[in-house]
Image (tube, rainbow, N blue to C red):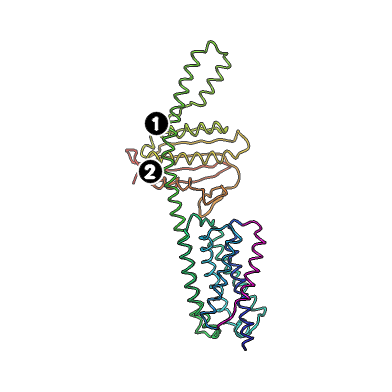
Amino acid sequence: MESLFLNMFLTLKLSYMVRFLAAVFLFSWKLPKQPRYWRRMITWSALCLLAAALIPVLSQSSFYIASMFLVEFLLAMCGNKICCKAEWNVVFYIGAAVLSAEHIASMIDSLIAMLWPNVLSFSRVHRITLPILLNWVLVAAVVYVIIYRWMFQSKSIALEHSLTHHITLMLLIVSLAVNLYMNIIYSSLVHNTGEWDSFFEYGLNILVSLFLLLVQAGMMRQSQTEKRLQTVSMLWEQAREQYQVSKENIEAINIKCHDLKHQLLAIKDKTDDAEYKSMMEMIDSYGAEIKTNNEVLDVVFQEKNFQCRKLGIQFTCIIDGAALNFMETTDLYVLFGNLIDNCIEAVSRLPKEENKIIQVTVRRDKGFVIVSTENSYQGELKWADGRLRTSKADKSNHGFGLLSIERIIKRYNGRYSISPDNHVFCINIVFPVNADGKANA
């Protein structure tokens, strides 16, 4: 009887280690990999399986059995640190999710085994059969894939900048404590598997694990939102400083160009006409002033016009700047700076120079101020949750321009629409204003 128990327990130890390893490596799939990743993963998996086989069975108590499974989990969890370029807060966060996911899979195993105890209950069959193996594998695969798609696949794991080591360690400790307690209860029910009075306990275990995952995912979303808002605020301050620098630079350039024109006029008679004309055109290209009846927009459009000239982009604007006098200086600079930067980024990818066109208009219409930008583009636009996604590879550190635009529009009770049509990308922003030209509350 003791030999049968040892053989059964050896099988359980190895099967749980396989499931822990599978969850760890699946949930960390999007993390940057260490050199020779596959060699590291295979080697560490083999060592973990060997360790699981060598863990002694010193007691048959529920606490000791649950503790051994948690030791297996800790070994498997360290695979993230060994095989991936992950900080400890990433390891802790994924580890907490692995604990809950494996416990959910185990409870579902038990619930299914209750339906066919003579076929699927390991405690009754006392050996690994094909139905038991399929039950273990399929349940774990379905649970792990669902949790992976929910918590990891659609989101970049930028945990290094989202959750601190203390928060993720707290998550892991809470998950360890809760799962240890639930595993002790589960182990005490193993001999009663197949009895319907266990149904409630298994269902409760699943609900508690799901709750832990929801809390974990919620903490991540809240932390990422706070980080993004902090980043936007920091960019706001940088934009305020950048506006002052740009304003001073443009004023200096305009003054210098004005002086150069007078100096050229003084030596016009001594200069070849073609050379004189060429030099005047060059000065005009640098010192071309754009007047919009709004000092902030003058700076923005002259700065962007100069940038477009360097890139061979045709930049046209029809601006009623006075219509936007109700907006604060930094808001104006950030809004139009980001709008035009996005246009320049899209147009710069076009191969033909004649297609590189950007047009911006600001006009009043029956109690509204309408801002429109149009630019040509190529390729497919990427959308997620009804929003345009950044095309940059590093999603977690980009997309703040779009977020800033949305925040400013919302601040002034505006609305916006995006209408890509025939390789022309249009953004239309509408601000409601009263008779005095101020934004409606």
The structure residue drawn at horizontal position 46% and vertical position 48%, both measured from the top left corner, is 403
User: Which label number is shown at residue 390?
Assistant: none
Task: Give the left or right position of residue 320, taking residue 29 as reference.
Answer: left
Residue 224 location, x and y as percent?
Answer: 47, 55
Residue 293 tag number: 1
> Residue 432 bears which disc, if any?
2
Foreground mark, 2 or 1? 1
Mark 1: secondary structure: loop
**Contact between labelled residues 1 and 2, with CB atoms less than 8 Å apart:** no
Q: Amino acid at mark 1?
A: Asn
Looking at the picture, tell me which residue is in the foreground, 92 or 309.
92
The crowding category of the residue bearing disc 2, from other C-alpha atoms within 10 Å (few below 14, some 14 to 19, many at least 20), is many
Inspect the image, locate mark 2, and give the three-letter code of the amino acid beneath it. Answer: Pro
Q: Is residue 37 magenta?
A: yes
Residue 284 percent across, percent down from the top left: 51, 24
Disc 1 residue crowd, few under 14, some 14–19, many 20+, Cα 10 Å: some
The mark tally for this picture is 2
Q: Position of residue 175 (x, y in %)?
A: 48, 69
Q: Residue at x 60, y 76 (%)?
A: 55
Q: Nearer the viewer, residue 93 or 294?
A: 93
- What segment is highlighted magenta in the picture? 34-59
Q: Earlier in the sequence, mark 2 or mark 1?
A: 1
Q: CA distance from mark 2 to mark 1?
A: 20 Å
197 left or right, relative to 31: left
